[in-house]
Image: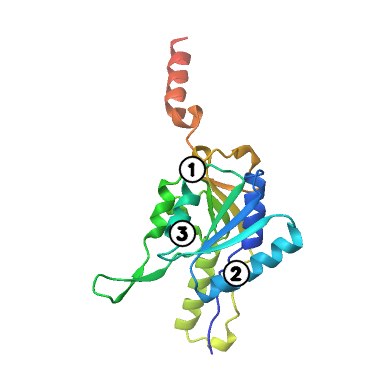
Amino acid sequence: NFAFVEIPELYEQTIDLMLHMQPEMRRLVYVSDMLANNVRLNRQIQEYIDKKHHGLEYEWLKVSEETSDSIQSYLMSDDMEIGLLLSSMYYSRKSAFGSPILVTDDIRLVAATPHPVFTLKQGYMEYGAVGGFFPDQAYLQERTLDIFKKMLSGVSMKDIPFVYSDISYPMMDYMLAIDAGLDMSNCPDGTVVINKPLSVWERYFWHICIAVIIVAAII
């Protein structure tokens, strides 16, 4: 017996978001490692493009020590006809002593790129990705916590229903998107926008209120 919590990678919706926000895009480059999930996603992305976006060029760029220059070239490019979609970026290389070591920090290259990078993993927004389409984390956390509570109360695992992600939304980082040359007015309805600067009214709300009260009192 086991419990199941689905955390889907919404590649179809994310690709549609990319085309919405980056209408010049003519080529999609999927950057990922060779984990089994990414091998499957590569196939699914190809099938989706062939079915819904025929004519959009596609490349799967597998991260490795040999492809690092190609990845950096894409990241440093200002060619908006190229869309970059990022998944996990783990790979191994040999140390100075000849033993394999796991490389996990190439994701930090994204923070320095002028090119917009979209991602299938919400956590990568913290490393400089501009956006993606994600399942609602608060909903999944709440349902997962509910599973643990039922387990601790003695409910049999076979009686705990699987949790599927029923709520999802596009998310964009305002400042990174603007810096990358994207038009935030293109955001689809329901987009969650993060890191948006406060308006003058929001920034000085209490100052304005106090000033109005003082003026009204004087008058």
Identify the mark nearer the N-term, 1 or 2.
2
Q: Which mark is residue 123?
A: 3
What residue does disc 1 label?
A: 176
Residue 80 appears at what percent x and percent y? 59, 43
Q: Amino acid at mark 1?
A: Leu
Residue 188 seen:
no
Say which amino acid is labelled 3. Gly
Number of numbered labels in the structure image = 3
Query: Residue at the left extreme?
Result: 97
- The crowd level at tag 2 (other Cα within 10 Å; few <14, some 14-19, many 20+) is some
| Cα gap from disc 2 to disc 3, whole angstroms | 18 Å
Q: Nearer the viewer, residue 165 or 45?
A: 45
Q: Which of labels 3 and 1 is toward the front? A: 1
Q: Earlier in the sequence, mark 3 or mark 1?
A: 3
List x then y, in percent, for residue 202. 48, 32
User: Spatial distance from mark 1 to mark 2, Cα to Cα?
Assistant: 26 Å
Q: Secondary structure at mark 1?
A: helix
- Along the viewing direction, whichever of 136 and 93 lies nearer the viewer: 93
Q: Residue at x 50, y 74 (%)?
A: 35
Percent across and percent down for residue 205 are: 47, 29
Q: Residue at x 55, y 79 (%)?
A: 4
Front of the two marks 1 and 2: 2
Q: Are marks 3 and 1 in contact (CB under 8 Å)?
A: no
Please identify the quadrant where the N terminus is shown.
Answer: bottom right
Determine the CA span between mark 3 and mark 1.
15 Å
- Few, some or many C-alpha atoms within 10 Å of disc 3 (few <14, some 14-19, many ≥20)? few
> Which residue corresponds to mark 2?
41
Q: x, y percentage for residue 180?
A: 51, 41
Q: Is residue 181 above or below residue 116?
A: above
Q: Residue at x 53, y 46 (%)?
A: 116
Q: Considering only vertical position in the picture, is 77 above or below 58?
A: above
- Depicted 212 relative to depicted 74: above or below: above
